[in-house]
Image (cartoon, helix red, strand yellow):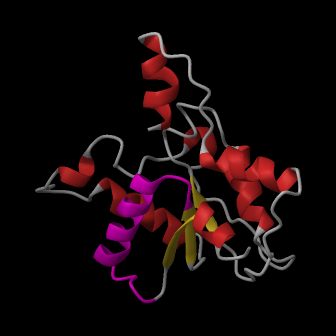
Amino acid sequence: CLTTLKNDYGEIGADLEVTHHSEFISQLIKEKKINPDNTIDEDITFHDACYVGRHHGEYDAPREVLQSVLSKDANIVEMERNKEQSFCCGAGGGNMWYEIKSGKRINVERFEEAIDTGVKKVATSCNFCMIMMEDARKVTGQDESMEVFDIAELVAERL
């Protein structure tokens, strides 16, 4: 949606101001218009969505939002591949609709990178990435031990 509204529609003459929700929430926090409680006391990892990161160039705002809900004892634990080098969850390439006959699904490979961080919480800033991470959580048998969130959800729960 972000890329379509911001870039693709612009190519056909639409002049729209488009802001990703992570940028909007980050700005609200900086301007003290919202003040989420920083009550998450466990480390968390963050999955960079391709369209927010590589296609839109936004890496800081989602992390600023995430940091705002973490206690002083909790940290963002980066996956090995993050920011500009992040690994796609598979949704952007339409992999949520493909039946992979051999090998590992992209979302499972990415979720295993989250598991490798040793944390029990994964956050993202894209609804499609969240779907892919949730699917991988079930496929990998992490239903009970790992949680997947959108950063907006984490903020909303703490207002």
Task: Determine the residue positioned at 25% across, 49% down.
Answer: 95
Q: Is residue 129 above or below residue 83?
A: below
Q: Quadrant of residue 35?
A: bottom right
Expressed as whole percent of the image width and height from the top left, the position of residue 32 reads 89, 57
* Quadrant (top left, top right, bottom left, bottom right) of the C terminus: bottom right
39 up-or-down from 1: above or below: below
Q: Is residue 51 part of the magenta span, yes or no?
A: no
Q: Position of residue 28 (x, y in %)?
A: 79, 52
Instruction: Give the percent coordinates (x, y) of residue 15.
Output: 55, 17
- Residue 39 lies in quadrant: bottom right
Left or right placement of residue 40 versus residue 50 in this view: right
Confirm whether the magenta stretch covers residue 135.
yes
Residue 23 shown left or right of residue 71 in the figure: left
Where is residue 11 drawn, in percent x and y? Answer: 45, 12
Task: Please name whichever residue, 26 or 147, is drawn nearer the observer in this view of the structure.
Answer: 26
Residue in the image at 82% along x and 56% along y: 29
At 60% across and 77% down in the image, what residue appears?
Answer: 119
Image quadrant where residue 59 sits: top right
112 or 134: nearer the viewer: 134
In the image, residue 83 sits, relative to residue 35, either above or below, namely above
Image side of residue 81 versus residue 138, left or right: right
Tell me: residue 70, above or below residue 113: below
In the displayed structure, does residue 19 sit left or right of residue 96?
right
Please report the residue visible at 47 percent of the width from the left and 47 percent of the height from the top: 87
Observer-nearest of 37 and 131: 37
Q: Which residues make up the magenta segment?
A: 124-144
Instruction: Kindly report the secondary structure that dominates the magenta region of the rendered protein.
Output: helix
